[in-house]
Structures are given as structure tokens and as C-alpha cells.
Amino acid sequence: MYLSHFQLAERPFRLTPNLAYRFQEQSQAEALTTLRVALAEGEGFIKVTGEVGLGKTLICRALLEALRPPYITAWLPDPHLSPGTLRTALARELGLDLPARPTQQKVHELLQEGLTRLVAEGRKPVLLIDEAQALPASTLETVRLLTNLETEQRKLLQVALFGQPELDHRLARPDFRQLRQRITYSCRLQALDRQAVGEYIEHRLARAGAEQPLFTTAARARIARASDGVPRLINILADKALLSAYGRGKTRADWFDVRRAIADTDATEDRLWWPRLQPAVRVTAFGLVALGAYLVLEVVRGGAV
């Protein structure tokens, strides 16, 4: 690979969420602060939404890393769970003992007893659900009912939902109004602006051991435009651009290398507009250009006469 060529200790733009590479982007930092404050206050529901690739899973893992005792956490990364499976998974994540083949009524009873005991011991149970927009409606309702469990002082279980904007659309439906009213804190992640994209790239390169800039200014600007500030796309384009520069024997990735990366990435928002135009539109555009050139030529000729 290109590691030795650029004198890097490891690949700086892996897609796997890595807390060691976490960039302190403002909306992410605000979301993490809001989550910690809301959980400290004992609120029942917190929601974090954002487009694909903006770092929701990374924030979720950062929160798991930050929540120390008395918090006790349960993380459910797979939302495709039935109500019964969710209860069982939650009970096991919290360390509760279940019979070999318990009925759902038994699981519910043991879960309530276990949560009551944990809270009496001074613990703070927290359920984190990633990709929450994909939760079945019945499972989402089960989550709401679990937050009904409470003592006179506080909720037995707090829930943080992480999801794409589709989660907001689902919760706007009339049948979810009860759950929507229980969400006391809500955060929306934002894409990086052009300056932050450059800082993000340099941050990850520094973490990987880079001792000098590996992207030209034009290359960073092109990545910012093509990725629309989405960290996942930035990683994809930057990694491919470095691979291209390595293949050409260059010490830095330039505009050309990023262009090659963009052409190889379907999800980019770059304005490589000419190759993407429909044939009929290309013909029309070419005709307009030709007509413009002809008119300019006629004006020049007329002036010469």
C-alpha cells in the first residue's frame, strides 16, 4: 500500500469508526455534550439525527466510552428487532439473568425487577439504539413503554436514539405523538464546511503520523466540494486520492488525483457535470456553445468591416 511511500504509521482514512481519530466538529461536540447533560438530568428520551456518514455511530461509541459508573449501558446496533427480542437483548446487555426459554411476560417482569434493583443500587441504566429509523413500529412503541417504568424520583431507563432524518419523519406521524412528546432533547448533526474539511483531513493525517502535508490546497478544496462535507465521503475520496498519488510516484495528492477518486466514487456530489449529462442534454449544450461562438465571430467580422 502507500503507507511507506508517505511515511505513515497506518491508513488515515479508514471507514471503521475509530475514537482515536475523532475530529472535534462543532455539531458533534454539541450533540455529545447535550447527551451527557440530558443523561445526568435523568431525562427519558434523547434523539440524535443526521444524514448518512455524518458520524452518528462514532458519537454513540464516544458516549459509551464516556459513560462510566454509576451508568450502566446497553447498546443495540441492530434495530431490526421484534419487541420480544429487544426486551431480551436489553436484559442481557444489562447483565440480568434469564431462564433458558422465558416467556415474554417473564422477560418483562425480570426486566422491571432488574431495572428497579439497579436504580436502588444507585446505577443509571441507559439504552442506546443506533439506526433507530429502521426500528419496527411495534418495537418503537415497546421502547416508549419501557421508559414508562419509573420510581417516584426518576425513570428506571433512559433511551438515546440515533438515526437518519427518516426518524424525524416517522416520529411526526400521529401514531407516534406520545413518544415524540417524551423526547426532551434533540440534536441534528451538520456537514463540515470547506475550512473544517481541510482541518479534518490534516487532523487524520497527523494522527496517522504524517509529518508534512499530503494534499495540495486545490485537492482539499475539491474533496470539500465533492463530499459536501460528509466525513465518510471525505475518507473515501482522500484514501483513493492518496492511492492515485502513490501510483504516480507523487509525494502529495493533487487536483488530478482527487478527480480520479471522484470518478471512481458513485456517492460523491462533485460537479463533474459533463460526463453525467444525458446525451440529449450534451447535444443541446454543445449546440448552445457553438451558437455562441458563431455569434461572437459574426460580431468580430462586423467590427472588422
Image: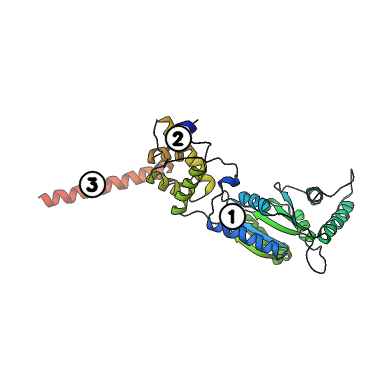
In the displayed structure, 31 sits above or below 208; it is: below
Measure the alpha-carbon separation of dots 1 and 2. 34 Å
Near mark 3 (Cα within 10 A), the count class, few <14, some 14-19 or many ≥20, is few
Near mark 1 (Cα within 10 A), the count class, few <14, some 14-19 or many ≥20, is many
Callout 3, which amino acid? Tyr
Can you identify the residue that label 1 sits on? 50
Measure the alpha-carbon separation of dots 2 and 3. 50 Å
Q: Residue at x 48, y 37 (%)?
A: 240
Callout 1, which amino acid? Gly
Name which quarter of the figure residue 5 lies in.
top left
Near mark 2 (Cα within 10 A), the count class, few <14, some 14-19 or many ≥20, is many
Q: Secondary structure at mark 2?
A: helix
Q: Position of residue 96 (x, y in %)?
A: 84, 50
**Marks 1 and 3: CB-CB under 8 Å?**
no
Apparent side of residue 249 relative to residue 149 in the rendered image (left or right): left
Q: Which mark is residue 294?
A: 3
Q: Nearer the viewer, mark 1 or mark 2?
A: 2
Apparent side of residue 54 relative to residue 158 in the rendered image (left or right): left
Q: Residue at x 49, y 36 (%)?
A: 8
**Marks 1 and 2: CB-CB under 8 Å?**
no
Name the N-terminal-most of marks 1 and 2.
2
Can you identify the residue that label 2 sits on? 6
Q: Nearer the viewer, residue 90 or 12?
A: 12
Query: Looking at the image, can residue 265 be seen?
Result: no
Q: Position of residue 104 (x, y in %)?
A: 87, 51
Q: Nearer the viewer, mark 2 or mark 3?
A: 2
Name the N-terminal-most of marks 2 and 3.
2
Q: Position of residue 93 (x, y in %)?
A: 78, 48
Q: Position of residue 275 (x, y in %)?
A: 41, 40
Q: Residue at x 58, y 60 (%)?
A: 30
Q: Nearer the viewer, residue 155 or 24?
A: 24
Callout 2, which amino acid? Phe
